[in-house]
Image (tube, rainbow, N blue to C red):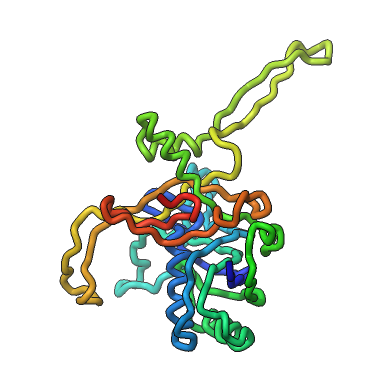
Protein backbone atom coordinates (compact mmCIF):
# COMPACT_ATOMS: atom_id res chain seq x y z
CA UNK A 1 0.00 0.00 0.00
CA UNK A 2 1.29 3.47 -0.93
CA UNK A 3 0.28 5.86 1.83
CA UNK A 4 0.45 9.61 2.33
CA UNK A 5 0.84 10.30 6.05
CA UNK A 6 0.05 13.75 7.47
CA UNK A 7 1.00 13.71 11.17
CA UNK A 8 -0.41 15.74 14.03
CA UNK A 9 -2.91 18.02 12.29
CA UNK A 10 -4.18 20.51 14.87
CA UNK A 11 -7.81 21.41 14.10
CA UNK A 12 -9.71 24.16 15.88
CA UNK A 13 -13.50 24.22 16.29
CA UNK A 14 -14.34 21.08 14.33
CA UNK A 15 -18.00 20.07 14.25
CA UNK A 16 -18.72 17.76 17.21
CA UNK A 17 -22.39 17.19 16.33
CA UNK A 18 -21.64 13.87 14.67
CA UNK A 19 -25.30 12.95 14.12
CA UNK A 20 -28.74 14.10 15.36
CA UNK A 21 -28.20 12.12 18.59
CA UNK A 22 -24.44 11.95 19.24
CA UNK A 23 -21.87 14.56 20.22
CA UNK A 24 -18.15 13.88 20.14
CA UNK A 25 -15.61 12.73 17.59
CA UNK A 26 -16.54 13.93 14.06
CA UNK A 27 -18.37 11.54 11.75
CA UNK A 28 -16.36 9.38 9.36
CA UNK A 29 -18.10 11.18 6.48
CA UNK A 30 -16.24 14.33 7.59
CA UNK A 31 -12.83 12.66 7.33
CA UNK A 32 -13.53 11.02 3.98
CA UNK A 33 -15.03 14.30 2.78
CA UNK A 34 -11.82 16.12 3.72
CA UNK A 35 -9.78 13.52 1.83
CA UNK A 36 -12.03 13.96 -1.21
CA UNK A 37 -11.62 17.74 -1.06
CA UNK A 38 -7.83 17.33 -0.85
CA UNK A 39 -7.93 15.04 -3.88
CA UNK A 40 -9.84 17.64 -5.92
CA UNK A 41 -7.41 20.42 -4.98
CA UNK A 42 -4.37 18.27 -5.77
CA UNK A 43 -5.74 17.21 -9.16
CA UNK A 44 -5.27 20.78 -10.38
CA UNK A 45 -1.54 19.93 -10.38
CA UNK A 46 -1.45 16.11 -10.43
CA UNK A 47 -4.37 14.90 -12.53
CA UNK A 48 -3.96 11.19 -11.68
CA UNK A 49 -3.80 11.64 -7.93
CA UNK A 50 -6.47 9.63 -6.09
CA UNK A 51 -7.28 8.85 -2.45
CA UNK A 52 -8.57 5.28 -2.05
CA UNK A 53 -9.08 5.03 1.72
CA UNK A 54 -8.49 7.01 4.89
CA UNK A 55 -7.19 6.12 8.36
CA UNK A 56 -7.62 8.48 11.33
CA UNK A 57 -5.42 8.42 14.43
CA UNK A 58 -6.58 10.62 17.30
CA UNK A 59 -3.90 12.05 19.60
CA UNK A 60 -5.94 14.59 21.55
CA UNK A 61 -9.56 15.74 21.65
CA UNK A 62 -10.94 18.68 23.63
CA UNK A 63 -14.73 18.88 23.50
CA UNK A 64 -15.79 22.49 24.07
CA UNK A 65 -18.37 22.10 26.84
CA UNK A 66 -18.96 23.73 30.20
CA UNK A 67 -20.99 22.97 33.31
CA UNK A 68 -21.92 25.83 35.58
CA UNK A 69 -22.26 25.62 39.33
CA UNK A 70 -25.49 23.80 40.14
CA UNK A 71 -26.04 22.69 36.53
CA UNK A 72 -27.13 19.10 35.94
CA UNK A 73 -26.01 18.82 32.31
CA UNK A 74 -23.18 20.19 30.20
CA UNK A 75 -23.77 22.94 27.65
CA UNK A 76 -21.94 23.73 24.43
CA UNK A 77 -19.59 26.69 24.30
CA UNK A 78 -20.93 28.72 21.38
CA UNK A 79 -19.02 31.46 19.56
CA UNK A 80 -20.26 35.00 20.10
CA UNK A 81 -22.53 36.27 17.34
CA UNK A 82 -23.16 39.85 16.31
CA UNK A 83 -26.03 41.77 17.87
CA UNK A 84 -29.41 41.98 16.16
CA UNK A 85 -31.20 45.21 15.19
CA UNK A 86 -32.44 45.75 18.73
CA UNK A 87 -28.95 45.40 20.19
CA UNK A 88 -29.60 42.00 21.75
CA UNK A 89 -28.04 38.62 21.19
CA UNK A 90 -29.95 36.60 18.63
CA UNK A 91 -31.29 33.23 19.74
CA UNK A 92 -28.95 30.45 18.69
CA UNK A 93 -28.90 26.69 18.40
CA UNK A 94 -26.11 25.00 20.32
CA UNK A 95 -23.29 23.94 18.02
CA UNK A 96 -20.82 21.79 19.95
CA UNK A 97 -17.25 22.17 18.78
CA UNK A 98 -14.11 20.15 19.41
CA UNK A 99 -10.39 20.88 19.18
CA UNK A 100 -8.44 17.97 17.72
CA UNK A 101 -4.92 16.70 17.18
CA UNK A 102 -5.09 13.90 14.59
CA UNK A 103 -2.93 12.16 12.03
CA UNK A 104 -4.30 11.07 8.65
CA UNK A 105 -3.13 7.98 6.77
CA UNK A 106 -4.29 8.23 3.14
CA UNK A 107 -4.01 5.28 0.78
CA UNK A 108 -3.18 6.90 -2.56
CA UNK A 109 -2.27 6.16 -6.14
CA UNK A 110 -1.16 8.20 -9.12
CA UNK A 111 2.08 9.50 -7.57
CA UNK A 112 4.48 6.77 -8.63
CA UNK A 113 6.46 8.85 -11.12
CA UNK A 114 6.12 12.23 -9.40
CA UNK A 115 8.82 14.21 -7.70
CA UNK A 116 7.93 13.81 -4.03
CA UNK A 117 9.43 17.18 -3.07
CA UNK A 118 7.16 19.10 -5.46
CA UNK A 119 4.14 16.97 -4.49
CA UNK A 120 4.57 17.49 -0.74
CA UNK A 121 5.22 21.20 -1.19
CA UNK A 122 1.94 21.59 -3.10
CA UNK A 123 0.17 19.51 -0.45
CA UNK A 124 1.35 21.70 2.43
CA UNK A 125 0.35 24.87 0.59
CA UNK A 126 -3.18 23.53 -0.02
CA UNK A 127 -3.57 22.44 3.61
CA UNK A 128 -2.51 25.88 4.81
CA UNK A 129 -4.66 27.95 2.44
CA UNK A 130 -7.66 25.99 1.09
CA UNK A 131 -8.62 23.22 3.46
CA UNK A 132 -10.96 22.77 6.41
CA UNK A 133 -11.54 19.45 8.16
CA UNK A 134 -14.89 18.62 9.75
CA UNK A 135 -15.74 22.32 9.54
CA UNK A 136 -12.71 23.28 11.64
CA UNK A 137 -9.69 25.42 10.82
CA UNK A 138 -6.28 23.78 10.36
CA UNK A 139 -3.83 25.51 12.70
CA UNK A 140 -0.71 23.43 12.08
CA UNK A 141 0.54 19.99 11.05
CA UNK A 142 3.74 17.99 10.96
CA UNK A 143 5.86 17.27 7.91
CA UNK A 144 3.93 14.99 5.54
CA UNK A 145 5.67 12.01 3.96
CA UNK A 146 4.95 9.09 1.63
CA UNK A 147 5.35 5.48 2.70
CA UNK A 148 5.48 3.29 -0.41
CA UNK A 149 5.23 -0.04 1.46
CA UNK A 150 2.77 0.49 4.29
CA UNK A 151 1.67 -2.84 5.76
CA UNK A 152 1.03 -4.53 9.09
CA UNK A 153 4.69 -4.27 10.11
CA UNK A 154 4.46 -0.46 9.75
CA UNK A 155 1.67 -0.06 12.31
CA UNK A 156 3.97 0.50 15.34
CA UNK A 157 5.76 3.25 13.39
CA UNK A 158 2.70 5.36 12.61
CA UNK A 159 2.49 8.77 14.34
CA UNK A 160 1.78 8.40 18.05
CA UNK A 161 0.92 8.12 20.76
CA UNK A 162 -2.66 7.89 19.57
CA UNK A 163 -5.70 5.76 18.86
CA UNK A 164 -6.97 4.65 15.46
CA UNK A 165 -10.74 4.57 14.99
CA UNK A 166 -12.04 1.18 13.81
CA UNK A 167 -15.50 -0.23 13.14
CA UNK A 168 -17.38 -2.42 15.61
CA UNK A 169 -20.44 -2.91 13.45
CA UNK A 170 -20.47 -6.64 14.25
CA UNK A 171 -21.56 -5.84 17.82
CA UNK A 172 -24.53 -3.88 16.50
CA UNK A 173 -25.50 -6.76 14.21
CA UNK A 174 -25.31 -9.19 17.10
CA UNK A 175 -27.58 -7.02 19.28
CA UNK A 176 -30.12 -6.52 16.49
CA UNK A 177 -30.24 -10.27 15.81
CA UNK A 178 -31.31 -10.57 19.44
CA UNK A 179 -34.27 -8.31 18.64
CA UNK A 180 -32.93 -5.07 20.09
CA UNK A 181 -33.49 -1.66 18.53
CA UNK A 182 -30.35 -0.04 17.10
CA UNK A 183 -30.52 2.95 19.48
CA UNK A 184 -31.09 0.64 22.44
CA UNK A 185 -28.03 -1.39 21.40
CA UNK A 186 -25.87 1.75 21.36
CA UNK A 187 -27.20 2.86 24.74
CA UNK A 188 -26.52 -0.57 26.20
CA UNK A 189 -22.95 -0.51 24.90
CA UNK A 190 -22.37 2.95 26.41
CA UNK A 191 -24.01 2.25 29.78
CA UNK A 192 -21.86 2.04 32.90
CA UNK A 193 -22.71 -0.79 35.29
CA UNK A 194 -21.75 -0.35 38.94
CA UNK A 195 -21.17 -3.44 41.08
CA UNK A 196 -20.73 -3.46 44.84
CA UNK A 197 -18.60 -6.16 46.40
CA UNK A 198 -18.36 -6.86 50.12
CA UNK A 199 -15.34 -8.63 51.58
CA UNK A 200 -14.26 -9.47 55.14
CA UNK A 201 -12.20 -6.63 56.54
CA UNK A 202 -8.79 -7.21 58.12
CA UNK A 203 -9.50 -4.64 60.83
CA UNK A 204 -11.20 -6.07 63.88
CA UNK A 205 -13.45 -3.06 64.45
CA UNK A 206 -14.97 -3.26 60.94
CA UNK A 207 -17.04 -6.19 59.73
CA UNK A 208 -16.89 -5.78 55.93
CA UNK A 209 -14.95 -3.81 53.35
CA UNK A 210 -16.98 -2.44 50.44
CA UNK A 211 -15.45 -1.95 46.99
CA UNK A 212 -17.09 -0.73 43.80
CA UNK A 213 -16.41 -1.85 40.23
CA UNK A 214 -17.45 -0.10 37.03
CA UNK A 215 -17.88 -2.12 33.85
CA UNK A 216 -19.28 -1.77 30.36
CA UNK A 217 -20.70 -4.45 28.11
CA UNK A 218 -17.64 -4.40 25.85
CA UNK A 219 -14.02 -3.93 26.80
CA UNK A 220 -12.01 -1.15 25.18
CA UNK A 221 -12.69 2.47 24.29
CA UNK A 222 -16.05 2.02 22.54
CA UNK A 223 -17.92 5.04 21.14
CA UNK A 224 -21.00 5.71 18.98
CA UNK A 225 -19.86 6.60 15.48
CA UNK A 226 -21.72 8.18 12.56
CA UNK A 227 -20.71 6.34 9.39
CA UNK A 228 -23.04 7.50 6.63
CA UNK A 229 -26.62 8.01 5.52
CA UNK A 230 -29.77 6.04 4.74
CA UNK A 231 -31.89 7.50 1.94
CA UNK A 232 -35.58 7.92 2.82
CA UNK A 233 -36.80 9.47 -0.47
CA UNK A 234 -36.16 8.91 -4.13
CA UNK A 235 -33.80 11.28 -6.00
CA UNK A 236 -35.62 14.38 -7.25
CA UNK A 237 -35.07 18.02 -8.16
CA UNK A 238 -35.02 20.57 -5.35
CA UNK A 239 -36.11 24.18 -5.80
CA UNK A 240 -33.62 26.99 -5.16
CA UNK A 241 -30.71 24.56 -4.78
CA UNK A 242 -27.19 25.85 -5.41
CA UNK A 243 -26.57 22.91 -7.76
CA UNK A 244 -29.58 22.61 -10.05
CA UNK A 245 -28.07 19.68 -11.99
CA UNK A 246 -27.61 17.21 -9.12
CA UNK A 247 -30.70 15.34 -7.85
CA UNK A 248 -31.66 15.89 -4.20
CA UNK A 249 -32.46 13.12 -1.73
CA UNK A 250 -33.53 13.26 1.91
CA UNK A 251 -31.55 10.97 4.20
CA UNK A 252 -30.99 10.19 7.86
CA UNK A 253 -27.76 9.43 9.68
CA UNK A 254 -26.46 5.90 10.15
CA UNK A 255 -24.84 5.44 13.57
CA UNK A 256 -23.00 2.33 14.70
CA UNK A 257 -20.31 1.43 17.22
CA UNK A 258 -16.63 2.21 16.80
CA UNK A 259 -13.56 1.65 18.91
CA UNK A 260 -10.40 3.66 19.50
CA UNK A 261 -7.44 1.30 19.54
CA UNK A 262 -3.69 1.86 19.41
CA UNK A 263 -2.42 1.01 15.90
CA UNK A 264 0.15 -1.53 17.13
CA UNK A 265 -2.73 -3.57 18.63
CA UNK A 266 -4.53 -3.98 15.30
CA UNK A 267 -4.48 -7.34 13.53
CA UNK A 268 -4.31 -5.70 10.10
CA UNK A 269 -3.89 -2.20 8.72
CA UNK A 270 -7.15 -2.77 6.81
CA UNK A 271 -9.01 -2.44 10.14
CA UNK A 272 -8.30 1.31 10.26
CA UNK A 273 -8.64 2.21 6.57
CA UNK A 274 -12.09 3.62 5.69
CA UNK A 275 -13.61 4.17 2.26
CA UNK A 276 -17.02 4.88 0.67
CA UNK A 277 -19.44 2.03 0.01
CA UNK A 278 -22.79 2.50 -1.74
CA UNK A 279 -25.38 -0.29 -1.36
CA UNK A 280 -27.97 0.59 -3.98
CA UNK A 281 -30.58 -2.04 -3.09
CA UNK A 282 -30.61 -0.88 0.56
CA UNK A 283 -30.34 2.87 -0.15
CA UNK A 284 -27.24 3.07 2.05
CA UNK A 285 -24.32 5.46 1.65
CA UNK A 286 -21.68 4.22 4.07
CA UNK A 287 -18.11 4.68 5.19
CA UNK A 288 -16.68 1.25 5.96
CA UNK A 289 -13.32 -0.30 6.69
CA UNK A 290 -11.93 -2.91 4.33
CA UNK A 291 -12.60 -5.62 6.91
CA UNK A 292 -16.32 -4.82 7.27
CA UNK A 293 -17.41 -4.37 3.66
CA UNK A 294 -20.13 -6.73 2.57
Residue 240 seen in the current view: yes
Q: Nearer the viewer, residue 134 or 67?
A: 134
User: Which picture quadrant has residue 217?
Assistant: top right
- 13 or 78, which lies in front? 13
The answer to whether residue 115 is above or below residue 256 is: below
The residue shown at (55%, 53%) is 271
**Across the whole image, how many numbered discs are drawn on residues?**
0
Task: Name the one closer to the observer, 122 or 9.
Answer: 122
Decide if residue 246 is on the left or right side of residue 127. left
Residue 178 left/right relative to 68: left
Residue 161 in view (yes/no): no
Please provide percent x and percent y for residue 224. 47, 47
Q: Looking at the image, which residue is at 60% across and 60% down?
A: 57
| Picture coordinates of residue 61, whole percent (x, y) | 59, 58
Left or right: 10 in relation to 208: left
Q: Residue 4: where, in percent of width, then height?
A: 59, 72
Where is 175 relative to 24, above or below?
Answer: above
Residue at horizontal 35%, vertical 68%? Answer: 88
Q: Quadrant of the N terminus?
A: bottom right
Picture coordinates of residue 186 (x, y %)? 44, 40
> Does residue 240 appear to the left or right of 19 in the view shown?
left
Q: Residue at x 38, y 56 (%)?
A: 286
Amino acid sequence: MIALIIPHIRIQNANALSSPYTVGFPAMTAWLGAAHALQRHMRAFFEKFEVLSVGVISHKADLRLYKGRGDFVYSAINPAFTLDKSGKRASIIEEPRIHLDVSLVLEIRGVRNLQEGDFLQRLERILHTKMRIAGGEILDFGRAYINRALDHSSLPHLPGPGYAIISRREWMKEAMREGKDALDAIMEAMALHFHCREEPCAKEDERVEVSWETKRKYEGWVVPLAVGFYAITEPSRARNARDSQTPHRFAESVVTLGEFRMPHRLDSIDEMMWSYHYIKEKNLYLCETKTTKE
